[in-house]
């Protein structure tokens, strides 16, 4: 299983939010470029980057910072947050981002997701962030009537790189992942599913792998010292 250490950006800093709440923020680093380098130096083989300001604004806010992080990291980077147009996605891919995540745009403009998936096969990710099973959009500030599984099934035939599935209630809480919901998503679609939200320790990573996830995003647990990067990599089965 692939391990994706997460770096969430807000105001040019590395932060984590509790359950996606912008009013419950903890700053874990003043220099995201240095954070990216340190993760790679510690053994990360890829990075998951989120422009939280962009997710809220609906357009890239920290694109230049993302470019510097990608260049400094030298490993495949996945970027989400504020990707709502074809030009934005294409610009990030041209700048060296390996995979771009579409969340709100995929729900509100499914034709854009289809167009991008076909134009950039294997480089577009469907981001599904669920609150009580229903998809949240616009930086998690609004909840759609659509269920995450229904949206996933609707796009299962596209040449996507995969799905990032986040349980918002678990995100940043260090309370363990929602394995039942994750298993439902994995069974529902043939696409690779990357789990996000709730990872508290190495055992949680092993549980996610056992359910059949293709990848696991880990953020708060790394920053809080609940698991080291080397422990996380080993738990994912990526150790040498």
Image: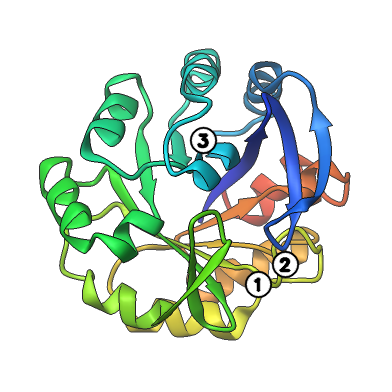
The answer to whether the residue labelled 2 contacts the one labelled 1, judged by CB atoms less than 8 Å apart, is: yes
Side of 186 relative to 121 (left or right): right
Q: Position of residue 4 (x, y in %)?
A: 56, 45
Q: How far apart are marks 1 and 3 (CA)?
A: 21 Å
Residue 159 is at least partly visible in this image = no
Mark 2, other Cα within 10 Å: few <14 / some 14–19 / many ≥20: many
Q: Disc 1 or disc 3, which is closer to the eye? A: 3
Q: Where is residue 95 in the image (x, y as percent from the top left)?
A: 34, 19
Residue at 72% x, 32% y is: 14
**Marks 2 and 3, the one that precedes in the sequence:** 3
Side of 226 relative to 131 (left or right): right
Residue at 80% x, 64% y is: 173
Task: Tell me the quarter of the picture where residue 49 sits.
Answer: top right
Judge whether 222 appears above or below 61 on screen: below
Q: In the rendered structure, find residue 204 and report the number of the disc placed on it.
A: 2
Q: Where is residue 85 in the image (x, y as percent from the top left)?
A: 27, 41
Residue at 72% x, 67% y is: 204
Q: How far apart are marks 2 and 3 (CA)?
A: 19 Å
Q: Can you identify the residue that label 3 sits on? A: 46
Q: Can you identify the residue that label 1 sits on? A: 207
Instruction: Please name the colour scheme applied to the rendered image.
Output: rainbow
């Amino acid at each position: 299983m692939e391990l994706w250490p997460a770096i969430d950006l807000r105001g040019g800093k590395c932060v984590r939010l509790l359950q996606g709440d912008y009013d419950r923020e903890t700053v874990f680093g003043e220099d995201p470029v240095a954070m990216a380098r340190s993760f790679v130096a510690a053994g990360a083989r890829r990075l998951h980057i989120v422009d939280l300001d962009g997710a809220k604004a609906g357009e890239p806010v920290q694109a230049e910072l993302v470019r510097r992080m990608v260049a400094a990291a030298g490993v495949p980077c996945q970027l989400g947050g504020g990707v709502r147009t074809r030009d934005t996605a294409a610009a990030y891919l041209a700048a060296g981002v390996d995979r771009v995540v579409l969340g709100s745009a995929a729900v509100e403009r499914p034709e854009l997701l289809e167009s991008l998936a076909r134009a950039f096969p294997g480089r577009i990710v469907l981001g599904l962030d669920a609150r009580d099973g229903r998809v949240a959009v616009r930086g998690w500030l609004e909840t759609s009537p659509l269920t995450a599984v229904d949206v996933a099934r609707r796009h299962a035939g596209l040449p996507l790189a995969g799905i990032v599935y986040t349980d918002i209630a678990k995100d940043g809480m260090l309370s363990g992942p929602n394995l039942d919901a994750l298993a439902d998503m994995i069974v529902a679609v043939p696409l690779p599913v990357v789990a996000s939200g709730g990872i508290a320790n190495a055992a949680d990573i092993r549980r996610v792998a056992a359910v059949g996830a293709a990848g696991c995003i880990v953020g708060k647990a790394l920053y809080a010292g609940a698991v080291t990067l080397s422990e996380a990599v080993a738990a994912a089965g990526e150790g040498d």
